[in-house]
Image: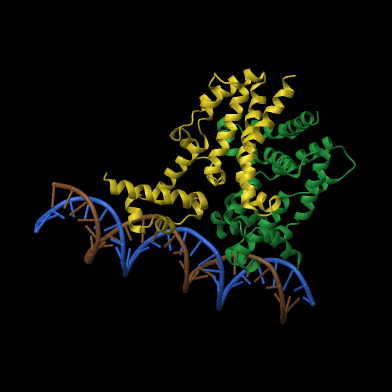
Chain colours: A yellow, B green, C brown, D blue
Amino acid sequence: MTEQQKDTEQQILKAARKVFIEKGLDGARMQEIADEAGINKALLHYYFRSKYKLFEMIFQEELGKFFPKMVTLMSSGDISLEDKIRAFVSNYISIFISNPFLPSFIIKEVHRDPDNLKSFFVKSGLDLNMIRLVITNLAKQLNMSFEETRHFMINMISLCIFPFAGRPLIEKILFSEDKSEYNKFLEERKTVVADYIISTLKINSK
Amino acid sequence: MTEQQKDTEQQILKAARKVFIEKGLDGARMQEIADEAGINKALLHYYFRSKYKLFEMIFQEELGKFFPKMVTLMSSGDISLEDKIRAFVSNYISIFISNPFLPSFIIKEVHRDPDNLKSFFVKSGLDLNMIRLVITNLAKQLNMSFEETRHFMINMISLCIFPFAGRPLIEKILFSEDKSEYNKFLEERKTVVADYIISTLKINSK
DNA sequence: AATTTATTTAACCATTTGGTTAAATAAATA
DNA sequence: TATTTATTTAACCAAATGGTTAAATAAATT
């Protein structure tokens, strides 16, 4: 594969990423992807045989971003639990600040075809056993049951993700459509959410 | 309008609700709505002129469910703050247990066309000034700034909604696709989330 | 029974869309 | 320079889709 080809391929993937993430599989148009990539439809199909093939690549890629090294983070042993939580929340929110439409995209597509989901897990580097192990270990540290720890993890993730998934609504209702204020708000949440989570732990440990 | 007509109209709306909520505007097919309603496409268009007109009615209706009497609840003065929170969380989660795809539907459509959102607010019974007033009052009770209270409200809402929006993912990863266990989990959250929220308040008030 | 109204049938239309093809052209490589 | 490769052009195709129409039929109303 020549440099040129690599370049074009990357340009197509970049364009596809943008269009798919914004509009989803159903809403995306191959013509729009071609336009965005600065090429024509014929060449687009010359590189990627079908819309769905192209979509699969993007979805897999983005699913990988959605589940970052959180496993690594939450399981590494040499920092305090409090610092782990702060690092996790801050990194996770940072990912979404860089990829603001990632949450709504994943939610959309995961609901569109829930049955086909599992096949994407392995390919996007998701290890189910590892995740369960992390939760089990966390449960020990927190002196909680597995079930309680699961609530805990989902609480943490909810607090990180939802402000991105519901942004258009929240921004209009509670921020008077002020985008820069909303960005500030999202930035604040790196510490607000972490503080919040940690404060509940201190109560429980008493 | 005869009873017959009312009946058919309701049947169409019911079918449209189901299909639109599951597949969104882009993914829904008029033929599928007709089939679901047990009628044909001609009659469907005889009752509702276009796909978008029909969609608008459904979206507006569902947006109304998405913002329930939470304003009423959080502002009524004769119960303690703790009880208000418990009632709000429990009622809010109940709504989503009855309408499991409501969150993903709203998230999907709100991202598809954010600009057109505002025009739906009034029609679906949403009073922006009222909401801001509720937050201001809440802020006084919590002895917090408006900004902190906004975080607080969004935390509460995030914890209620996200487990529905992300269900296909969470269920597969953390619940081994066990639907009934997930339903139990959602039911549990009525108290888990409320406890969680209230526990953070107790710390803050010290 | 006559008439109006609701519903079906089924053909049809225009547009959009994913995808293909073959020839022309530009760019890189041997 | 000759040849291979990447890209464009533009016409084309088949299927899907939203929407229409007109006539037939069934059901309710007068």
Q: Is residue A100 left or right of residue C29?
A: right
Q: Residue at x 76, y 64 (%)?
A: B3
Q: Taking A111 as reference, is B92 left or right?
A: right
Q: Is residue B181 among what the camera can see?
A: yes
Looking at this view, name the residue that lies furthest to the right.
B78
Q: Is residue B182 visible?
A: no
* Viewer-closest of B125 and D24: B125
Q: Give how far across and how far down residue B130 sits, in percent.
A: 79, 53
Q: Please name the residue shown 58% across and 34% down the image.
A: A90
Quarter of the image where the C terminus of chain A is located: top right
Q: Report the front residue among B189 and A118.
A: B189
Q: Position of residue A161 (x, y in %)?
A: 60, 40
Percent x, y for residue D15?
42, 59
Relative height, residue A201 to residue A109 (above, below) = above
* Position of residue A18 measured from the top left corner of the image (x, y, whole percent): 47, 50
**Count of marks placed on residues:** 0
Q: Note whether A204 is above or below A41 in the view shown.
A: above
Q: Is residue C27 above or below residue A151?
A: below
Quarter of the image with the N terminus of chain A is top left
Along the line of sight, which residue is nearer the eye, A77 or A135?
A77
Identify the residue shown where x is 82% and y is 48%.
Answer: B72
- The residue located at (71%, 27%) in the rendering is A200
In the displayed structure, would residue B71 be above or below residue A118?
below
Quarter of the rendering containing residue B13: bottom right
Splitting the image into 4 quarters, where does residue B143 fall? top right
**Apparent side of residue C15 relative to residue B28 in the rendered image (left or right):** left
